[in-house]
Image (tube, rainbow, N blue to C red):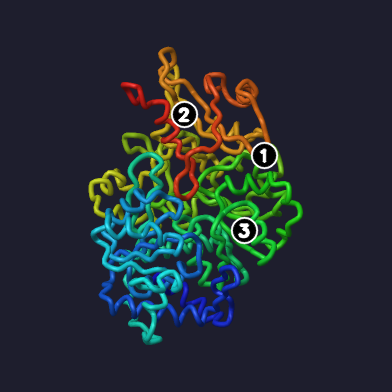
Amino acid sequence: MRLIDYFDRGAAMYPERDCLVDGASRRIYADVEKRSHRLANGLLERGLVAGDRVAILSPNAATAFEAWIGVARAGGVWVGLAALATIDDNVNIINDRGATWLFYHADFCDVIEHYRTRCPSLVNLVCLDESAVAGRDGLSLEGLMAGQPDLAPDLPDDPDAIISHFTTGGTTGEPKGSMWSNLTWEAWTGNVFAHLPITEPPVFLAAAAMSHATGVFVWPYMAFGATTVCVQKADPVSVMEAISTHGVTHTFLPPTIIYMMLSHESAPSYDFSTMRHMIYGGAPMSTDKVREAIEMFGPCMAQVYGQAEVPCTIGIMSPAEHVAALENETTQKRLLSCGRPAIYSRVAIMDDDGNLMPRGEAGEIVVRGDVVHAGYYGRPEATEQSLAFGWHHTGDIGYLDPAGYLFLVDRKKDMIISGGLNVYPIEIERALWGHAAVQDCAVVGVPDEKWGEAVTAVVELKTGESATEKELVNWCREKVAAYKVPKAVHFRDQLPRSGVGKVLRRKVRDEFWAHSDRQL
């Protein structure tokens, strides 16, 4: 299937159903379908050729999703830009991909000249808001569609055609463009519906960034006539209000937002009864937080583990598996896993010599299957390196337990060597996340004459909460081995995060290594 086929299925089966909801604005599938044909024709008339890269810079907005649907219909390659990223970061992505088109939200009108002057590949810049370009010599989404026919040329059904570029997280190095083909999307969609089946048209809340997993989930859900409700900022009140007001059934949220919802004083006043799948990913959740979330939101928690190169379903854990894991102390440990490999994701553990490891032994998590991306744009050497021994290398260390649950140990590059012993930050971070005062944290190795690297925690506390260094050190001492207990705890008002909300552990680490003559 082509990417556009998912939307077209929803439009054919549910033409009168709300497709996109954005504040007071609502558009049904039949209208969005017609507009997508006009937009595709407008793009083609202005010279877009299948395979051209088209960047979209916007918070979650109906017009941004409409632009993406039209781009897919025309055969353009979507390049997602994080609305919260810096201008420099987004300029680098546009230039790296050689994007020739940029659709931008009205929020970026004041800075759009930076992109126009610093991105030489850009030929067409299109504002998503008609009123924002009124009186200016600019092109708008509505202007691009004006006067265009209601039927666009049909694209060839090429499973290997590249249709999307997702940008790697950049948490451990320079972001790269991960190329997804139609076949990548098809395998990902199969994984979603095999493990998180849908029985009725969903109401999907797009709250986390559309340039991340939120945008990925919208497409398969549209095939079942999903109504996508757009929220521009994923703050806890906006999310809870949207769920309660619109009867949201499905959403994707990073754990940070879920934690903020759980701790918010007004949370019990909202109605979460319609929730079927509250999907989390991007970082693990502690067992205590998962239990609390199920008590608050109902038996709807679902976890996905993936990366830009393997969309969201290296591991997956359904709501039923979450509930079953709570039945006894033995199965509760499964909540610390990232689920089991999805049906179209072959997952194994590999050592540095390319040998596959038996269950229970830790090594690098590697993946095979159609769900793996087609490579990094313009970086054949990086692509070849990531596919050593015929498997995609995730850069994550983990192991599979006897029941097939996949446990993450940590990022391969983030391992701390303290006193000659290997320490994986995620174990200490999980312990700290369980403390009532901790909102989020990052654990890093800091240069130390005695230990080589001293385990150090940098903590962001919840609003109105307090904790001391001694208190958190003692908390960790009860939960992890002595050599893993932080030697120091630092407090920050806010931890550095990527444009999609991930804590940038590498940036935290750099703060402590800036004046060191070594990096290991």
Q: Residues within 10 Å of mark 1 (few under 14, many from 20)?
A: few
Residue 70 located left or right of residue 457: left
Q: Residue farthest to the right?
A: 269
Question: Residue 320: in sight, yes or no?
Answer: no
How many labels were placed on the picture?
Answer: 3
Quadrant of the frame with the C terminus: top left
The quarter in which the N terminus is drawn is bottom left
Q: Residue 435: where, in percent of width, then height?
A: 65, 33
Q: Identity of the amino acid at label 3?
A: His
Choose the circle earlier in sequence order: 2 or 1.
1
419 vs 49, left or right, is right
Considering only vertical position in the picture, is 51 above or below 291? below
Q: Residue furthest top?
A: 450
Question: Where residue 201 appears, x then y in whole percent?
Answer: 60, 72
Question: In the picture, residue 161 is in which quadrant?
Answer: bottom left
- For badge 2, the amino acid type reads Val
Residue that lies at the very extreme toward the front in this rendered image: 135
Q: Is residue 43 visible?
A: yes
Dot 3: element: strand
* Residue picked out by circle 2: 444
Instruction: Measuring from the top left, give residue 385's x and y in whole percent.
Output: 27, 44
Disc 1 element = helix
Answer with left or right where residue 358 lies relative to residue 155.
right
Q: Nearer the viewer, mark 3 or mark 2?
A: 2
Comes first in the chain, label 3 or label 2: 3
- In the picture of the structure, the residue carrying the numbered disc 1 is 288
From the viewer's side, name the closer residue of 463 and 53.
463
